[in-house]
Image (cartoon, grey):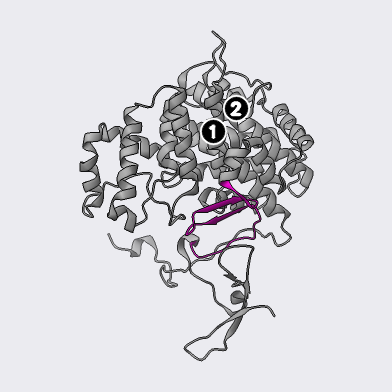
Amino acid sequence: MKKTVTLTFSDGSPPIELPVEEGTYGKPVIDIRPLGAHGYFTHDPGFTATSSCNSAITYIDGDEGLLYYRGYPIEELAYQSDYMEVCYLLLHGELPTATQKQAFVESISHHTLLHDQMENVFRGFRRSAHPMAVMIGVTGAMSAFYHAGLDNFNPQHRESVAHRLIAKIPTVAAWAYKFNEGQPFVYPQNRLSYAENFMHMMFATPCEDYEPNPALARALDRIFILHADHEQNASTSTVRLAGSSGANPYACIASGMASLWGPLHGGANEAVLRMLEEMDDVSKIGEFIRRAKDKSDPFRLMGFGHRIYKNVDPRAAIIRRTCYEVLDALDLRDDPQFRIALELERIALEDEYFIERKLYPNVDFYSGIIFRAMGIPTSMFTALFALARTAGWVAQWHEMLSDPAHRIGRPRQLYTGAARRSFVPLEQRGA
């Protein structure tokens, strides 16, 4: 027997039966769609208590600190898989066979080049433009190059779009950096792995050969895995909402990038690095801890706590270990900012103030340190986040358009403006 809940009214109106749906994991959801026929909507600013879709891609349990991609724990994928395999998993629902993976990697490699005319799109920006602004503009401009004959409701077309985006966004990101630096664009090398290819395009110049450091490439690949998807966050919801209208998928991904760029979303690791720079020395940590505890002080410690994870961010331990590996590979274990970060983490794990509030280090706490050690400037941090998240965005877009229950998104509102009134001519409105 299907479970239901009954909504009753204090004014004696007839009660309403609402179905209850249950997924593989997580809280049950009440299907509120019947409310519309009875003249009611629900009110949920920020959609924090609203399930907007069915999805089989990613599961998060914030209380237990769990993150699964298609049922696989993030810890297993981070240490035993690679980003290309995870991309395939997100798109297709299963890990690939050796043959499937080879074909997938070859397809991605085949699409890494940008159309030659897209160089003109880059050159339309100021050299000082933020790389995310350039990425959003260039990704949106792809819709002008890959539009004719595209049918969003054709699964083969959607797969082709997914491969193009996963392949080309690293090129877009690296070229945004090169343009910002006034350096010539470096073309992709398809003999390299996904992470190595990005590093090559970022750091190589026509003047000399560049060979990516294997330890750094492994670390970058792992970071891409950790950021590949994260359920229905702001940027993913933006992609889904834009895509629900049947909009061009390249424009949809650009809209997701715009949402990600916000400091409350993808810009958090930049904020962590700025905070560590402000602290400057381990001896000053106590002062900043006192400020963080002072409710009258606007200062807040960045990189601690998470809106979803009320326990430990499962990605944090992985990226902490990765941080050690990177700094060891570069002989930077005595890096001042890393020592500040370690001391901050020690205090947070021992101080009752942080323990009671469950303010544990999150994934952003260490990712900025890793990027800086690798020579990636702060302005590129969110760009790398967007690069990694592209796989999740296209998987969510593809899933949404495959869903028979798919409809164009149309949130409702609680109107609190003026009641109906008559127009007053200008000359009657006073001085």
The quadrant of the image that shows the N terminus is bottom right
Q: Using residue 169 as the reference point, say whether residue 422 is left or right of it.
A: left
Q: Is residue 247 visible?
A: no
Cα gap from disc 1 to disc 2, whole angstroms: 10 Å
Q: Is residue 182 visible?
A: yes
Q: Residue at x 31, y 45 (%)?
A: 301
Q: Using residue 214 as the reference point, say whether residue 399 is left or right of it.
A: right
Residue designated by label 2: 171
Q: Residue at x 43, y 67 (%)?
A: 423
Residue 61 belongs to the span the image colors magenta: yes
The mark that comes first in sequence, 1 or 2, is: 1
- Mark 2 element type: helix
Against 354, is 412 above or below?
below
Against 208, is 220 above or below?
below
Do the CB atoms of the residues marked 1 and 2 lie less than 8 Å apart? no
Residue 276 belongs to the span the image colors magenta: no
Q: Nearer the viewer, residue 182 or 393?
A: 393
- Mark 1 element type: helix
* Quarter occupied by residue 35: bottom right
Disc 1 residue type?
Met
Q: In the drawing, what numbered circle is on residue 135?
A: 1
Q: Using residue 244 as the reference point, say whether residue 66 is left or right of it.
A: left
**The magenta segment:** 48-74
Q: Residue at x 64, y 31 (%)?
A: 168
Disc 2 residue type?
Thr
Q: Nearer the viewer, residue 246 or 42?
A: 42
The mark closer to the camera, 1 or 2, is: 2
**Which residue is the extreme one toward the bottom?**
12
Please provide percent x and percent y for residue 406. Answer: 69, 59
